[in-house]
Every structure is written in C-alpha cells, then in structure tokens.
Amino acid sequence: MIRLYDTKQRKKVDFIPREEGKVSMYVCGPTVYNRIHIGNARTFLSFDTIRRYLTWRGYDVTFVQNITDIDDKIINRAREEGTTAADIAEQYTEAFINDMHAAGVLDPDIRPKATEEIESMIELVSELVERGHAYEVDGDVYFSVRSYEDYGALSGRNIEDMEAGHRELAADGQGLEDRKRDPLDFALWKAAKPGEPSWDSPWGKGRPGWHIECSAMSRKYLGLPFDIHGGGSDLVFPHHENERAQSEAACDCGFANYWMHSGMLQINSEKMSKSTGNFMLLHEVLENTRPQALRMLMLQTHYRSPLDFSDERLGEADVALTRLENTLKNMDWQMAHAQYEMPAAIDTDMLLAACYAAKDEIVTAMDDDFNAPAALGSLFTLCTTINAELADKTISQVDAIPLAIVRDNVVELLGVLGLDIASEDQEEEDTYPFEVIFLADDLAGYDGADVIEAVDVLLDARTKARENKDWAKADAIRDGLAELGFSIEDTPQGPRVNLGKR
Ligand code: AMP
Ligand code: ZN
C-alpha cells in the first residue's frame, strides 16, 4: 500500500486511486516567459520520479501538465522585446520541452496549452456565474470567495487572517481592487486591455485569469475528482486554493483527492532570487553537468524537504553517480573476461538475494511517501555488496549467467528512480573514436573494423608486451590510447579502459 503526504489533510494517508490500477495526475506546468530555473526543475523532477515509480509499481498513470502561455509576464516580456505574446510563448514552450528532455523528464501524456483551451475555461466561468459563485463587473468576472464555504481548507488559512493579508491576492497581477465586491475575490476572466491578446466571451473580449486554466484542463482531461494534484509548495496559496474553490463550487463535487507539494530549492542556503544574482537556469547547469548527476542530487533530498543546491553538492552527486556506474562497469568487465573450464568463483546466489532484498527495501521506502533518499541508500548498499564480491576475483563462465541477472536487477532498480545509467554507457561505447582501429592495426596487427574489439586487442597486446618486458611497446600502446582520450586502469583482473576522465 502506497502512503503519501496529503497537503490538505496535513498527514500521510493511504493512497487509494479512484479507479483500481489507474492513477490520474495533474501537475501545474510553467508560465512560458523565460527559460526555467533549477527550482522549477526540482519540482518537475520530483513529480517525474513519483510518476515513474507509480508506473513501475503497476499503475496505469495518466499525467497531465499544462503550459501557461498567456499571462501578464508573457505580455510584458513581449513588450520589452518588441514582439507578440504568442511569439514569446512559442519560443519558451519549445525551450521548456527541450530543457525537460535534456533533464530526462518524461513527457506528460497530455500537455494542454491555455490559449487552446479558452472555450472550456469560458464554460467553467459561465457555470460559476450561473450558480452564483461569480459575478461580472465591466467585462471582468470575479470568483466570490465567501460563496465557497471550504475556502482556506487546503492551505490551512481562515478567512479572517486572509482579510488582513488580502493584499497578497491583490498583488496577484490583478490590481483592480475597487471593482471587486470583496477584496478576497479573484479574477476568473479579465476584460481586454488595448494591445493585449484577447478572446470573445459572454462578457466581451478578454482573457482568462491564471487559476482557471488548471481547473478547466484537469476537469476536461481527467474528470473530477481526479487522484493527485501536484506542484511546488509556493503554489498552495493562492493558486491551488483558488483552483480548488472554483472547481468544487462549479460541480458540488470533489476536485483532487490528494494534494502533493514539493519543497522549494534554495541556492547556497538562500532563496533563489534574480535580483541578487542567486539564480541558476536549468540549461546552464546542464551545460557542465550530466543530467543524471542533477537527478542524483535531487533524489538525495526527500521531495517535500527544502533542497539546498550548490556546485559542491552537484559535484558530490556526480561522484555518487559514478560509484553506481562503476558497479555496472565492474560487472560488464567481469562478464567479458569470464574464464572457461573453471568452477564458480563468486557467490551469485548471495548477490541475487541481495538484489531481491534491495528491491523490497526500495519498494518499502518509495511506498512511504516516495522516500527516494532511503531507496538510494539501499541501492548503494547493494552496489557495495556486488563490488566486494567481485573484488580481486576472476569469474568463471558459470558465474557469468547469474551475474547478468544481477546486472539486470541493478539496472531495473536504477530505473525505478529514473537513473537510466545503462543506456548512457551504451552511448559511450558507441562514441569510441574510429582511429582506435588504425592504432590496433599499427601496434597489434588488428584487421577488423570494430572499435570495441580494437580496444580489447590493444589491451591484450599491451599485457603480452609487459609479460615479455617489452616496455617500449607497452608504453606505445598506452600513449596511443591516451592520445585518443582513453585512460588505462590496471586492476587485479587486468587492464580496463575509460574514455575520457570524469
Ligand atoms: P511557475 O512557472 O513559476 O508557475 O513555476 C513552475 C513550477 O515550479 C511550479 O510548480 C512552482 O511551484 C515550481 N517552483 C518555482 N520556484 C521553485 C523553487 N525555488 N523550488 C522548487 N520549485 C519551484
Ligand atoms: Zn495550476
């Protein structure tokens, strides 16, 4: 049974999907007016991990994430750059999707854009007006907060406190205090201003308020009430409180059965802020960092806790990732060098049992509100066990088959956490420079055309040269490989090459 922390109930609860075996999930997407920063990436990676886990756990997950492609920030940016809001939105939607792919985040099943869903938003606003939960003033439509009894239940605020702080709502890009019947009310529809994009509606030309799009899209694509609504914790109030109010007021039904919020990312223990320069864009970070290392960093902190980002921690995460990769490489190398006509040399039954124990631990950790740091801990323990068993050994062909099953298990468990390391390795082999074939021809008489084989032939020739105390030849092979970017590591099992240094 999966248990998750529900923001509204303020405790961990059993997760019971509305339909057995299926999960409907909505996570608020970005406002596309600039490249996303690593704080946004933290939230998107957190929900990517959750979604991947639910899928691996056997659920058929439908994941919806919107693109807010009309908003004050987009309009302002378009003005600054002397172009249209549509142009800015298109440019940054594409950049967002590219950034998500670069970070290894899976595409949502459905990615609706606000500007393409205006009709369903108008429908929802009309229903709220008909039901007396919303009212029109000069082409604007406002939601009447006091008409919805449960307002504040999600964020744990009461109306009186909110009254005192109503400027928070006013600061929500509305600036039309005097038109509202109550300062707590918020805009569902905004009358068009000259020069701004607008759409026809029963209240004249205008555009939607921010909150309404998520209510309209989740209802349309998932149906109400759906299972999980997610986002960063900064969205709880007012965005999610307002989404919930307008959705539930329109249907007298539930909106989201579970609310999940990820903690904020900070840089060097301080709030990320553009004005102080304490700010990092995802694509800039990924220029110098492997995406899997960034994911490793994110996994090391529980998704609900604040995450402290620093270059130092990113470097440490990269080292941790390399440790996991080395276990896979270790197994690969052993399997490639297994000896015939030799009895079993390692305890593969013990290794397989360790895999199954790790799998159980990972399921227990992830079922407990997606505790990825604990799951990672089990993965590292497993890798340590495997490395220790392989150390200083030459394995037999008899060991190679069960070891391949151990390897498959490790790859699967890495994948549960979104760490697709195995495929990265494959790519690495594919990038061996072809010149290594000429080098193998020159120095070892190789007449084939396979880069991986050529490297093996060179290593064998180097080993033979060393046995014959032909140091000049052994050095020539090492130097030739080094020129092509390979480094040789001598291990008890023989030499191993790495392409490039990490
Ligand atoms: P926005 O485009 O500002 O609506 O943000 C998109 C997503 O990123 C939302 O789910 C936000 O909650 C989330 N987000 C924004 N800043 C941070 C941060 N510093 N740490 C984690 N998530 C954030
Ligand atoms: Zn939303």
Image: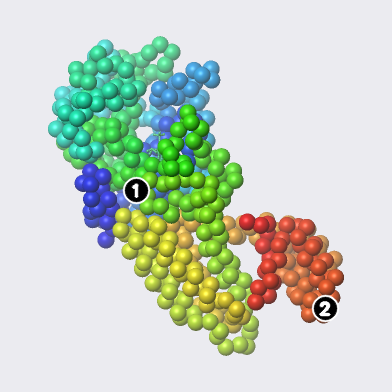
Name the residue carrying label 2: 469
In depth, the one of 451 and 265 nearer the eye is: 265
Type of amino acid at the residue the image marks with label 1: Arg
Q: Is residue 464 above or below residue 214?
A: below
Secondary structure, mark 2, is loop
Q: Which numbered marker is on residue 208?
A: none
The answer to whether one can see residue 220 in this image is no
List x then y, in percent, for residue 135. 20, 19
Q: CA distance from mark 2 to mark 1?
A: 60 Å
Residue at 51%, 40% in the rendered image: 282
Depicted 40 relative to depicted 59: above or below? above
Question: Where, by quadrant of the figure, is residue 375 drawn?
Answer: bottom left
Q: Quadrant of the N terminus?
A: bottom left
Foreground: 392 or 347?
Answer: 392
Indicate the amino acid at tag 2: Lys
Q: Are marks 2 and 1 in contact (CB under 8 Å)?
A: no
Tag 1 secondary structure: loop
325 left or right of 201 in image: right
